[in-house]
Amino acid sequence: MDATLMTSLSMAGAYAAVAFAAMGSGLGAGAAGTAAVGAWKKCYAANRPAPIQLAVFAGAPLTQTIYGMILMFLINGKVRNPALAAQWPLFMLIGIAGGIAMGISAWKQGVAGAGACDAFSETGKGFTNYLMALGIIETVAIFTMAFAIILLGAVK
């Protein structure tokens, strides 16, 4: 296999990290955003103020795209070293697996955020509790990124 192909495959793995994370962010933000819009509509229909805090729940899944971007940059940094070209399967695996894990975290965070939107709009209570639940789900993506960084640091 020539160096150009190995570099290209490594870069594809780097892009997969952000692409899969972004897919999950889109699904999660879509789920929570839809719930936020529905909750706001219920508030308006009942002549109650619409809580702006629902935007926090709707936007929470977007951070996983940032984690995927960080992973992409780190993999690309390794790819620039020609001596590491033969490591392309590792870079591809880290990008794909890491991106999928972060994407699932974002997706499920959005599903939980949808529930938070519904609950908070009806009661006006529990914002911090709901945010803690979303933070626990977020931790999966943070751990995924951190462990990938440790693994990439071992590649010399």
Image (cartoon, rainbow, N blue to C red):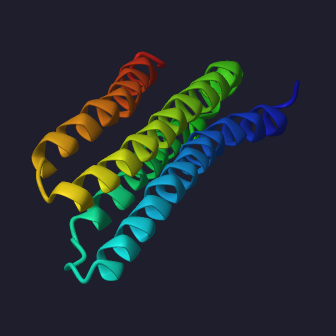
Name the residue at the front extreme: 46
Q: Is residue 123 above or below residue 100?
A: below
Residue 14 higher or lower than 148, as above or below:
below
**Left or right relative to 44: residue 7:** right
Report x, y in % for residue 55.
31, 67
* Nearest the eye: 26 or 129: 129
Which of the 4 image quarters holds residue 95? top right
Location of residue 67 in the rendering, given as x and y in whole percent from the top left corner: 41, 44
Query: At 45% across and 63% down in the image, what residue appears?
Result: 33
Badge count: 0
Quarter of the image that includes the N terminus: top right
**Residue at coordinates 26% horizontally, 30% vertically from top-left?**
136
Q: Nearer the viewer, residue 100 or 78?
A: 100
Q: In which quarter of the image is residue 12?
A: top right
- The location of residue 16, given as percent across then percent down, is 65, 41
| 108 on left or right of 44 | right
Q: Which residue is drawn at 40% across and 50% down?
A: 114
Q: Front-most of 11 and 21?
A: 21
Residue 135 image position (x, y, % from top left):
24, 38
Residue furthest to the right? 1
Q: In this view, does 84 lie to the left or right of 44?
A: right
